[in-house]
Image (spheres, grey):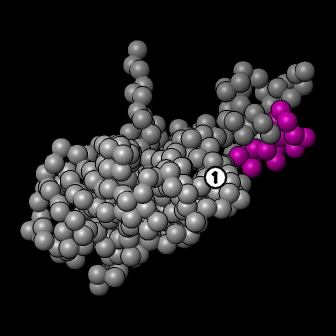
Amino acid sequence: MSRKRTRAPEPTSLSGWALAVVRTISAAGVDPHPLLQQAGIDNAALTDPEARVPVASMTKLWRLAIDATGDEALGLRTPDHVDPSSMFAMQTLTLSAPTAEMGWNQFSRYLPVLSTGLKIELHKNAEQDFTISLQTADPRMAAFEAGDASVACLIANLRNLKHLGVTITAIDLFRPEPQAADEFERLLGAPVSFEQKATRVHFSTERPLHTPQETANPALEQALQQVLQDYMERLRSTGFQEQVKREIARAMTHGEPSLAKVAEQMHISGRTLQRHLVDEDSSFSDLVNDVRQNMAKQLVGETDLNITDIAFRLGFRDASNFSRVFRRWFGQTPREFRKQP
């Protein structure tokens, strides 16, 4: 008897991060729309603040962008194109905390909102000397440019903590050394070492991280935490197949659900949707059948709709055909099922 493979959920990034990358590409003089299409990313996802984009698709987008622009340092230019409002105001959250240390803890806690494929840890080397390490879910699959962009944004945020007197002392990058190594040091403003075992940012401060922040705002901090916590709970409770089923159920109210329409609603290509389901040992037709079966049980058992209406609503040709399938599913006809206590 074969057993289904158990796979960890595929890492995803918030649409706001994808939007920042698209703006970076556009600022380099390249039309991003053909690249989005080749990477399997629906442009509509960029206008949905809660949409998620697979990290694998972002990796394709980065590689296409480097080929199109010829700019090895493209990732380092991303901070100029980040819209805080499309990133759940994470930077505002850190600045509204009582101290930078507490703000960092909040950022680490809610980082999965931005990306479930990235892990960031702060290490205290001495009283006012620190190292931040960045790890991706699978370094072999992640684009080097994505790491460059993450480091550049992190450094930009550190430099915003002006009350601490932050100095970036050194940067270690996992990526191979580019031909434009000097450009990396110019843009990052610190010595850079390439081909390191891990990606790290080393920095020192003139004042401790627990120094009170003038930007502290307890009410704003609490409100932002609530928004982020709500989103995190939705993110944890909704796996990929459940997202597909939800869109199938919505589509079924307007007729037979199609893979193309469901993929469009999820802001991904049909090919990408199929690939994800194959990776999880599932198929679109299996999920349609699951949704139809669950909806049949609910409509027959919990509503007073007549059987013919339910049959048509679920895409069956007639009530007799629906009754035969319903009996195969549940061992009873719809009327027998409805009569039971």
In the rendered view, would you say 178 is above or below 288? below
- The percent position of residue 166, horizontal first and vertical second, equals 36, 62
Horizontal relation, residue 23 to residue 169: left or right: right
Q: How crowded is mark 1: few (under 14 residues within 10 Å), some or many (20 or more)?
A: some
Quadrant in the picture for residue 36 = bottom left
Q: Name the residue under label 1.
A: 225
Relative image position of residue 124 (x, y in whole percent): 35, 43
Up the image or down, 326 lies above or below 117; here it is above
Task: Compare residues 110 and 102 and report the one nearer the observer.
Answer: 102
Amino acid identity at mark 1: Gln
Magenta region includes residue 302: yes
* Residue 6 shows in this picture: yes
Q: Nearer the viewer, residue 119 or 315?
A: 119
Left or right? Give the position of 307 relative to 268: right
Q: In which quarter of the image is residue 288?
A: top right
Q: Which residue is drawn at 42% across and 35% down?
A: 8
**Quarter that holds the N terminus:** top left
Task: Report if residue 52 is visible in the image.
Answer: no
What percent of the width, then of the height, locates residue 322? Answer: 72, 38
Quadrant of the rendering where the C terminus is positioned: top right
Q: Give the range drawn in magenta.
A: 300-314
Q: What element carries label 1?
A: helix
